[in-house]
Image: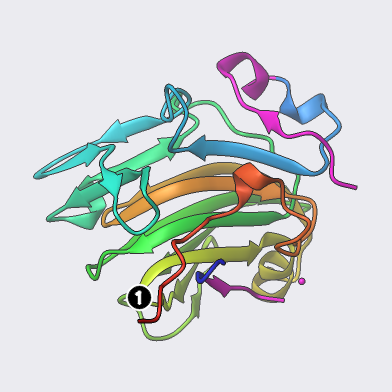
Amino acid sequence: MSTHRRISTEQKISPQLSLSCDLLKMFKNTFQSGFLSILYSLGTKPLQIWDKEVSNGHIKRPHDEDIQSNVLEIVGSNIQSTYITCPADPAATLGIKLPFLVMIVKNVKKYFTFEIQVLDDKNVRRRFRASNFQAVTRVKPYICTMPLKLDEGWNQIQLNLADFTRRAYGTNYVETLRVQVHANCRLRRIYFSDRLYSEEELPPEFKLYLPVQQKG
């Protein structure tokens, strides 16, 4: 039984595409559908295509008691100076055209923020930044900052980047260029999809299983 919450802006499974450094260069000219995972905490090298920055904090892979699994933990006293960013090369871009971003993240009851950089059909780079310490949405020419409400424990954050781009800037989403996740959180997986999938449709490795609470 899954007890995690979904945070969503609304709602042909193909085999999962797994990223490698070589694949990053090919996404722009590759047909994309289904699911595209850029981080999985159980992988042998979960940060293989990511760069990391740590100042007065840590990035570790502890065992999470709630889901009985290894997870990626990002903790820092200053959220701006401790983060992971993808792709690792600052000059590279992801080129991911799938419009839905899904993050399986744990609320560790501290300040937390993440940022997505996209390209629109006006050839303008826009950034969407969500933070759990911001109260209102603010739209500026190149960045839209938004409040993020997390439930206790594990959450599934779902972002419709095409809808965000259209509502904030009146333009059309073309592709995602970069994903950056700052302290403080625990991560299980980050992936893109062509649409939102129901729990029943998701491949097993994309689900977050939480232990069933026994009522005694």
Please provide the residue range marked out in magenta. Answer: 5-25
User: Does the magenta-highlighted stretch encompass residue 24?
Assistant: yes
In the rendered view, tell whether residue 26 sits above or below residue 214: above
- Residue 122 visible to an observer of this rendering: no
Which residue in the protein does label 1 denote?
A: 152
Count of numbered circles on the image: 1
Mark 1: which amino acid?
Answer: Glu
> Colour scheme used in the picture?
rainbow
Mark 1, other Cα within 10 Å: few <14 / some 14–19 / many ≥20: few
- Residue 215 visible to an observer of this rendering: yes
Position of 130 compared to 2: left or right? left
Residue at the image point whose x is 45% and y is 34% from the top: 42
Give 79 or 151, whichever is nearer the viewer.
Answer: 151
Residue 97 at x, y percent in the picture: 75, 43
Residue 48 at x, y percent in the picture: 44, 23
In the rendered view, tell whether residue 85 sits above or below residue 12: above
In the rendered view, tell whether residue 186 sits above or below residue 52: below
Residue 11 at x, y percent in the picture: 76, 71
Give 23 or 202, whichever is nearer the viewer.
Answer: 202
